[in-house]
Image (tube, rainbow, N blue to C red):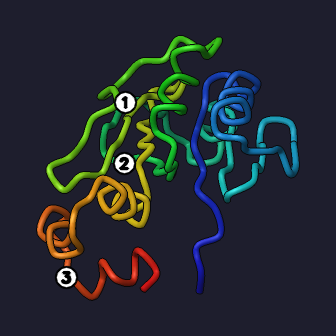
Amino acid sequence: MRLKNILLVVENIEKSVEFYKSLFGLCVINDFDGNVIMTEGLVLQDRKIWETLIGKDISYSGHDAELYFVENHMDRFAEKLENSSFEIEYVNPLMEHAWGQRVIRIYDPDHHVIEIGEELDGVARRFLKAGMTREEIAQKMQLPLDYIHELIGE
C-alpha cells in the first residue's frame, strides 16, 4: 500500500488552484469540475461535492494538520508572499527555530495550515558557510555528527 494523494476541501476551487499555482508552482494535472488533481499529490475538492460524498457538513480551521513544503531560499519566498496578489494570513512570519531551521507558516484561502521550511541539508550548509564547525552544527541542530556529514555530502 502507498499514499497516493492529499485531498483538501475548498470553498472556491478556482481561487485555491491559483493560490497553489502562483505561490508553490504546482500545476493542474486533471480538472474534473470540482475535483482538481495537482502536481505533488495535492487534490482540491469543492466543499459541496465532499459534503455530498460523506453526508456531513464540514468546517475549516481545525489547526490539526498542515501541508509542508521545503524551500532553501526563505528570504526570497517571504518576499514572494509579501508581493503576492493574495492576502496572506500568517500563522507565523519567517522565524528560526532553536535548531536553526527557518520556517514560515501561513493559511491557504480556506484556512488550511501550510508550513514552508528549509531542508535540513540547507540549514547545515548555511551554518557551515557561516563558519561553524561540523561539531557545532550537530550541537545546534540537535543531530548526530554522522548525520551532519550526510547532510553536507561528506
Percent across and percent down for residue 135 are 16, 75
Q: Is residue 143 left or right of residue 147?
A: left
**Residue 83 image label:** none
Residue at x 24%, y 52% (from the top left corner): 100
Q: Which residue is mark 2?
A: 65
Is label 1 in a helix, a strand or a loop? Answer: loop
Q: Amino acid at mark 1?
A: Ser
Q: Which residue is mark 3?
A: 144
Q: Amino acid at mark 3?
A: Pro
The disc, 3 or 1, on the residue closer to the chain's N-terminal end is 1
Count of numbered tags: 3
Q: Quadrant of residue 61?
A: top left
Question: What separation in Å lies between label 2 and label 3 (alpha carbons)?
Answer: 28 Å
Q: Amino acid at mark 2?
A: Ala
Q: Is residue 2 left or right of residue 35?
A: left
Mark 2 or 3, closer to the camera: 3
Residue at x 59%, y 14% (from the top left corner): 83
Q: Which residue is mark 1?
A: 61
Q: Is residue 43 left or right of residue 111?
A: right
Percent across and percent down for residue 75 are 46, 32
Above-or-below relation of 124 to 15: below
